[in-house]
Image: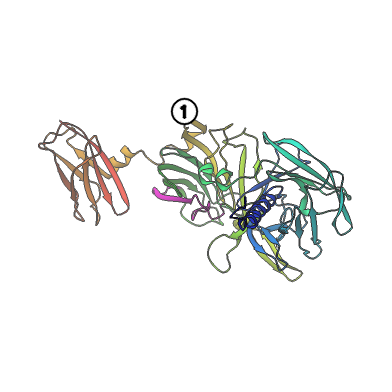
């Protein structure tokens, strides 16, 4: 019997080949787009710092190969990694394991490439063959030979996998996972003997799974309080001014693509009147300030925290302007959970400024004195639910000293001393009492609101019942200080009277008898 669709066989073969090629491209690939990779130094002892990187662009080379470039970074001019107390950095296209990953369609070979950057980095192209026969040898880069010394089953992060080990003739070792990519490799893809090795600290993560995700960094809820010590930089032997800042979350809104917090902030301090200082001497308390923090859940970015979500060494403008400094990511810091409101894992950033000396072109250096800006975020950690996930731990002249928050379990967690912040950010009832008085309360037919200050343009009164339904509303004329609220005919019970407009909102409780 003849088959009527013999023409379909070549097409099926092509489709099977394409599918096999796609799977081959995915399997053993050292890095994949859309994922964040985290590595720690093999030689580290104790709480290790972690380096994060990603592929951030894809293209086709002139030879028709597929290429993926790593995110560009600031590199310490000494050749070490960021966060080693470096005094100078330079922009580099070479990340921890090279400048790009290259794959030739139809092959099972991957190449990690670095670019030559003066005397700081020698260019190389390292050919990796994780599917080669065990014991086979090939020319990996220049005169460096590679041997596939082992390949077999292994558990990676608790998941079954297959791992290949490639040993270079000069000493460095690379380990690749069939599912999760590069597990270990030499720093800066240097192929000489004695090169520091880095290993994967965890499996690759999407942004939503990573420490940089907004809901992971800012696990706050309405009512949570954060208290900071405040001390601006000063010249001389004593500060010009110092004090404390208290923040209170008033609202949280989570949508499929955004996270928004509303909060109040108030500062109290002391000015000392030293000869080199300016301003009035004595204690002061600033008015309450309302703020808004917004985050994109798609990108991790925030207008209020412009450093997020830069990875290790990754950089961007600190703010708008042609001469703005750059802000760069530092390594993830594994810190002991002890101490004052400390967290097991922190994300840190710092600003660097262009240093255009004739003999040292292209250098960037951290700011000093009043320009020494740094920022630290506390990453959420199930092992320390109290202090972790509180977001901004330190920014420039603010350092976290007090936390009071309600955990998802309902328990109230407190660390630090609340006494320094007593009297800041009065409660809603205290704020309402300062703005106006509602009398009589309880009331029968009518209640009268007497404002401490004349009403502003655009303000309105609204009365809601215990179910949240609006039962009465009326505009308040600008300059008005007294308003009456009719209650005749309404059921007895609990009501809320709200005065809103001009960027503020105040609520009084009212009992109708």
Where is residue 469 drawn, in percent x and y? 22, 40
Where is residue 20 drawn, in percent x and y? 67, 51
> What coloring was used for the rendering?
rainbow
From the viewer's perspective, is 25 left or right of 243?
right
Camera-side residue: 417 or 381?
381
Where disc 1 sits, the SS reads loop
Residue 329 appears in the rendering? no
- Quick one: quadrant of the C terminus? top left
For label 1, the crowd category at 10 Å Cα-Cα, with few meaning under 14, some 14 to 19 and many 20 or more, is few
Residue 320 appears in the rendering? yes
Question: Residue extending furthest bottom?
Answer: 358
Snapshot quadrant of residue 67: bottom right
Q: Is 67 situated above or below 129?
A: below
Camera-side residue: 358 or 454?
358
From the viewer's perspective, is 503 left or right of 372?
left
What residue is at 61 percent from the left and 34 percent from the top? 339
From the viewer's perspective, is 465 left or right of 215?
left
Camera-side residue: 142 or 296?
142
Question: Residue extending furthest front?
Answer: 1
Q: Is residue 292 magenta?
A: yes
Q: Which residues are magenta?
A: 283-308
Q: Is residue 142 magenta?
A: no
Where is residue 399 drawn, in percent x and y? 56, 44
What residue is at 57 percent from the left and 33 percent from the top? 382
Mark 1 lies on residue:
411
Q: Is 203 situated above or below 143?
A: above
Where is residue 77 drawn, in percent x and y? 75, 59
How many numbered callouts? Answer: 1
């Amino acid at each position: 019997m003849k088959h009527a669709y013999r023409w379909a066989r070549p097409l099926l073969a092509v489709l099977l080949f394409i599918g096999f090629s796609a799977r081959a491209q995915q399997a053993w690939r050292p890095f994949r787009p859309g994922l964040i990779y985290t590595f720690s130094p093999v030689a580290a002892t104790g709480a290790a710092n972690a380096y994060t990187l990603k592929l951030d662009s894809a293209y086709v080379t002139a030879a028709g190969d597929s290429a993926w470039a790593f995110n560009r970074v600031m590199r310490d001019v000494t050749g070490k990694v960021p966060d080693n107390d470096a005094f100078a950095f330079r922009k580099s296209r070479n990340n921890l394991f090279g400048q790009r990953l290259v794959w030739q369609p139809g092959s099972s070979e991957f190449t990690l490439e670095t670019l030559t950057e003066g005397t700081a980095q020698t260019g190389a192209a390292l050919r990796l063959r994780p599917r080669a026969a065990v014991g086979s040898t090939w020319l990996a880069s220049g005169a460096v030979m590679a041997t596939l010394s082992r390949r077999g089953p292994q558990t990676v992060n608790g998941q079954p996998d297959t791992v290949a080990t490639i040993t270079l003739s000069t000493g460095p070792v690379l380990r690749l996972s069939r599912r999760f990519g590069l597990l270990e490799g030499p720093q800066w893809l240097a192929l000489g003997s004695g090169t520091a090795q880095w290993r994967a600290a965890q499996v690759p993560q999407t942004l939503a799974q990573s420490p940089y995700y907004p809901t992971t960094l800012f696990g706050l809820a309405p009512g949570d309080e954060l208290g900071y010590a405040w001390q601006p930089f000063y010249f001389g032997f004593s500060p010009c001014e110092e004090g404390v800042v208290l923040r209170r979350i008033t609202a949280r809104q989570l949508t499929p693509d955004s996270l928004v917090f509303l909060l109040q902030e108030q500062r109290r301090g002391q000015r000392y009147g030293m000869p080199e200082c300016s301003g009035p001497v004595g204690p002061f308390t600033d008015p309450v300030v309302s703020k808004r923090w917004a985050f994109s859940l798609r990108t991790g970015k925030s207008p209020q925290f412009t450093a997020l979500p830069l990875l290790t060494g990754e950089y961007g403008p600190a703010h708008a302007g042609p001469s703005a400094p750059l802000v760069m990511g530092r390594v993830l810091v594994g810190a002991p959970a002890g101490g004052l409101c400390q967290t097991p894992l922190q994300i840190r950033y710092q600003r660097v400024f262009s240093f255009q000396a004739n003999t040292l072109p292209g250098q960037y250096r951290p700011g000093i004195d009043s320009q020494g800006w740094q920022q630290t975020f506390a990453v959420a950690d199930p092992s320390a639910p109290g202090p972790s996930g509180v977001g901004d731990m330190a920014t420039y002249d603010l350092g976290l000293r007090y936390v009071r928050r309600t955990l998802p379990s309902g328990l109230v967690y407190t660390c630090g001393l609340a006494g320094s912040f007593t009297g800041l950010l009065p409660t809603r009832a205290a704020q309402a009492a300062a703005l106006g008085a509602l009398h009589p309360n309880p009331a029968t037919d009518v209640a009268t609101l007497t404002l401490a200050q004349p009403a502003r343009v655009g303000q309105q009164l609204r009365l809601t019942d215990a179910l949240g339904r609006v039962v009465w509303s009326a505009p308040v004329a600008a300059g008005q200080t007294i308003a009456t609220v009719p209650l005749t005919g309404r059921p007895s019970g609990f009501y809320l009277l709200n005065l809103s407009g001009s960027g503020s909102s105040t609520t009084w409780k009212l009992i109708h008898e």
